Image (spheres, rainbow, N blue to C red):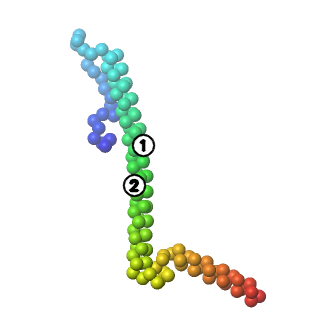
Amino acid sequence: MADKLNLSPQKIYDKEFNTESMRGYVPQEVDAFLDLVIEDYETFQRALTSLKKKNDDLEKTNAALRAKVVELEGKERAREQNPSDPLAYGAENVELLKRISNLENAVFKNGKK
């Protein structure tokens, strides 16, 4: 969007008007007006930067949530296809089985000493 703008705060600040004719603009009035325009552009640029950052954050969050949805849909399909298979219930079951195995090993090793 900023690429489509014709003016920047610096371009506005550097602009000079011809005051050679008798009926030219009053330089103080033009400067006062341009000061207001510069303020508006600076405010606009701050808002634009903030919105771009928020947009990037939301796009990252959206991508993460989409990945989670795909993961959950895959798990649900696996459960529907083979409801009796304990491995179809995902990595959480595998992790639990590993923990149980480690506990059993610890208990039985301590008991055999």
- In the figure, residue 67 lies in which quadrant? bottom left
Residue 98: percent from the left, percent from the top?
A: 59, 79
Residue 85: percent from the left, percent from the top?
A: 47, 83
- In the figure, residue 101 lies in which quadrant? bottom right
Task: Residue at 48%, 81% (x, y): give it.
Answer: 87
Task: Residue at 34%, 16% (x, y): give it.
Answer: 28
User: Vertically, is 55 above or below 93?
Assistant: above
User: Vertically, is 34 above or below 85?
Assistant: above
Residue hosting label 1: 50
Along the viewing direction, whichever of 60 and 79 lies nearer the viewer: 79
- In the figure, residue 79 lies in which quadrant? bottom left
Please name the amino acid that badge 2 sits on: Glu
Q: In the displayed structure, does residue 4 sit left or right of residue 73? A: left
Residue hosting label 2: 59
| Image quarter (top left, top right, bottom left or bottom right) of the N terminus | top left
Q: CA distance from mark 1 to mark 2?
A: 14 Å
Residue 25: percent from the left, percent from the top?
A: 27, 16
Answer few, some or many: residues within 10 Å of disc 1's Cα (few below 14, many 20 plus, some between 14 and 19): few
| Image quarter (top left, top right, bottom left or bottom right) of the C terminus | bottom right
Along the viewing direction, whichever of 8 and 75 lies nearer the viewer: 75
Q: Secondary structure at mark 1?
A: helix
